[in-house]
Amino acid sequence: MLTMTYLQHRALGRADSRWPERVRRAVFASAAADGALINALRVEPELGSPARGGLPATVARRSGDGWRISGHKLYGTGIPALRWLAVWARTDEAPPRVGVFLVPRDAASARADGDGIRVIESWNHLGLRASGSHEVVFDDARIPFDHAVDLRAPDAWAPTGASQSDVDAHADQQAWMIVLLGSLYDAVARAARDWVVGFAKSRAPASLGAPLATLPRVQEIVGEIDALLQTNRVLLDDAAARADAGVPPDADASGLVKFTVTNHAIRVTELALQLSGNHGLSRHNPLERHHRDVLCSRIHTPQNDSILVAAGRAAFAAHGDAR
């Protein structure tokens, strides 16, 4: 949840942010004064992830000096604690515009006149169970006119239709998303590594008469784990340094970092489970939770198939037209 708030603040802090200055300052001030959190609500039951294309079913209608938002969102990470909801929606205009509408949580929760939001506490996931990523239903939630913070024609959101400024902003956002989310899942994998090292040092089967850590095969597995984590550290440190310097990798390159780091994190927990056996799968120990949590890394945009297709196209394009 904190990672998602950091990403939203990074986007708002860019000099080329499209958000109205008054709205940006309100979000920043609430964070500084109250620790207010913000996250994007994008995924829908019918649409799925908007990264795959398509218009959202969530609709914003002009009403007096503001907007009314109606729709249904899935995976509202952190919704029990969020102050600001950055909702992906379309207008009811012809043709529609698509973009971000900022719904203040306190205002949306005041349902005296029928406006508001409803949280369906449906989050029952394999991993990240404490994230509170419930469904959110908007029922004519009222927002001020300037809370339509970034509206564009649908084609303008596609990479081929974006301005160079938007391409640069996307690359910056992708780089920071990969650094933050990658670091999160890498840290989970490191916790799994630390647990299994402690387990191997303390576990001494009677048939062996010595700790598991004395076996060359166990040492080999832990060595493989450390090799995977060392690669992750190099990739994440490089991506963070480049983003800090204002020269982030392009979106395709950031995607490959995400693919590598998250797959390494999953492999680390798999190896740890292989080494620890039933002990690792027991809910009395943290390893099974670490494994469940890192599996969730696969669902974050960009997903593995999109990352690899983009990388393959880029490789062929470097040697001529790709069909």
Image (tube, rainbow, N blue to C red):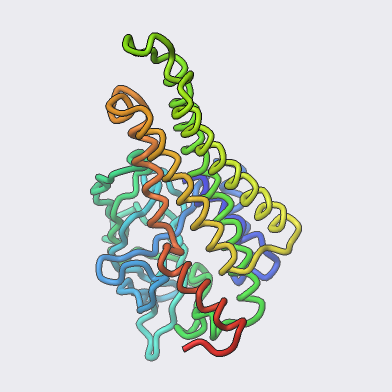
Residue 87 picture quarter = bottom left
Q: Is residue 158 above or below residue 293?
A: below
Question: Between 69 and 127, which is closer to the camera in this rendering?
Answer: 127
Asked if residue 174 can be seen in this view, the reply is: yes
- x, y percentage for residue 220? 49, 33
Q: Determine the residue positioned at 40% across, 67% down.
A: 305
Q: Is residue 192 left or right of residue 15?
A: left
Q: Quadrant of residue 171?
A: bottom right
Q: Residue 259, how many percent across, how many down?
A: 49, 58
Residue at left offset 60%, top offset 60%: 175
Q: Nearer the viewer, residue 72 or 145?
A: 72
In this view, the residue in front, 227 or 165, is 227
Does 260 appear above or below 249?
Answer: above
Residue 26 visible, this angle = no
Q: Position of residue 291 (x, y in %)?
A: 37, 39
Q: How many marks?
A: 0
Name the residue at the right extreme: 245
Q: Say if 72 sits above or below 231 in the image.
A: below
Residue 57 screen position, x and y as percent: 30, 74
Q: Is residue 277 above or below residue 303?
A: above
Q: What residue is drawn where x is 53% and y is 49%?
A: 182
Q: Residue at x 33, y 40 (%)?
A: 129
Q: Is residue 25 left or right of residue 64?
A: right
